[in-house]
Amino acid sequence: MVVPGKLKSCLLIAIILFLVACDNDNAGNTKLVSLEESKDNDIVIPTLALTAVPVASRTQAVPVATFTPIPTITQITLPSATSDLRVTLNSIEDFGEMRNPLTGELKDNDSVLNRRPIAVKISNAPAKHVRPQSGLNDADLVFEHLTEGSITRFTAVIYGDTPEKIGPIRSARLIDLEIPVMYDAALAYSGSSIGVSRLLFDSDFSDRILRSNASGYYRSGENKPYEHTLYADPEKLWGALDERGQNRAPSYWSGMSFSTEPPGGSFQATSVNIRYRKFTEIDWIYDEDNNRYNRWTDGVEHRDANSGLQVNATNIVILLAPHQFNRSICENQRGGQCLAYSMEIHLWGQGRAYIMRDGQVYEVFWVRHTPGEMLTFADTHGTKIPLQIGNTWFQVIPSDELEAFSFQE
């Protein structure tokens, strides 16, 4: 086991990727071309324009950033199966009726797949009041992102498993206009600024918004600031959706791909260190014994209060996306002056990403061109890169902050 803490950046990411690209010419593997190498080999690289896109327009249609299209995504070719345990899921039809489309996991009871996913807003600061959070290990997907300052917040999508409680629950941000649409989910949160609230209730999913006055929420009664005491019973949240006629199986026309066998074109790295602007530092460290990544936050094991177990995930996706302040929405105002504008994160179009699975790292591009699309991943040739079957954490980082993370073998 690697000792957590300040992980040394032994090699620059660009050097690692260049060396790996040179070593992946074996027949049958998809070659991973580094961004620097690709400039000399006429590989088509998508480029994102950082021009601001008005957030108000996101409620009706998705303005797509200017980019150079990658080639048509083709189905990935994996080695022929020698065991019934090998699974490849590339299309919605591959999942059938018993597999979770958000994790690829086979469920022995399809009833849980007939309910609607719920995206729940969970606080991550201040640590002494909110950690350990409840329900993180039961989430199929977790997005960690910057808010208007340097602190981070989570949006956890629960669906296939049911935590006994989830929280502490806090207010929504602009990123929460995107996540419920991607996963046909409801949204559970404590409240929001006036600007964000108007956009949420003007959205196509306004009928499945569950604010803190809905059934299922409660105050924990803990001796800490009141705003950090809001939790929810997920079963009752689904009950609240039942009452509105909104609790049904999600509808997807496209989705993520999964495989039990890792594809070629990777480089080895068993840990990553992520730094969110001097506010918090995260280490994900690979545990080969269970093929999962364990999380440390600020040098301390990050645990789930429901079980006491360390927070862990099968896949870690470092997702680079343009960030900008929306100066029409104020999140913190005092004396008539705005102290913090709302952060807008562009999760539409396409951008760079790194997938960590099975102790390997893949340099990829994330793609999402229409509201109903989930985030999918492809290499520079347009070939799908599948996730390992299991839960996924998305570490959302500004696209111009490559120095904010580093891998270690």
Image: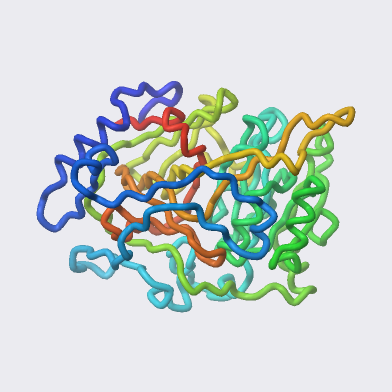
The answer to whether residue 333 of the structure is visible from this angle is: yes
When the figure is inspected, residue 115 is found, relative to residue 190, above or below; the finding is below
Percent of width and height locating residue 254: 46, 70
Q: Residue at x 32, y 65 (%)?
A: 72
Q: Residue furthest right?
A: 335
Q: How many marks?
A: 0
Q: Front-most of 263 and 87?
A: 263
Q: Front-most of 292 and 279?
A: 279
Q: Residue at x 28, y 52 (%)?
A: 44
93 relative position to 74: left or right: right
Please tell me in which quadrant of the rendered image residue 294 appears: top left
161 relative position to 262: left or right: right
Q: Front-most of 279 and 352?
A: 352
Percent of width and height locating residue 133: 65, 41
When the figure is inspected, residue 372 is found, relative to residue 284, above or below; the finding is below
Please tell me in which quadrant of the rendered image residue 164 appears: bottom right
Percent of width and height locating residue 351: 43, 48
Q: Quadrant of the C terminus?
A: top left
Q: Quadrant of the N terminus?
A: top left
Q: Residue at x 55, y 35 (%)?
A: 302
Q: Residue at x 59, y 42 (%)?
A: 304
324 relative position to 56: left or right: left
When the figure is inspected, residue 311 is found, relative to residue 244, above or below; the finding is above
Query: What's the coloring here?
Result: rainbow
Percent of width and height locating residue 79: 19, 63
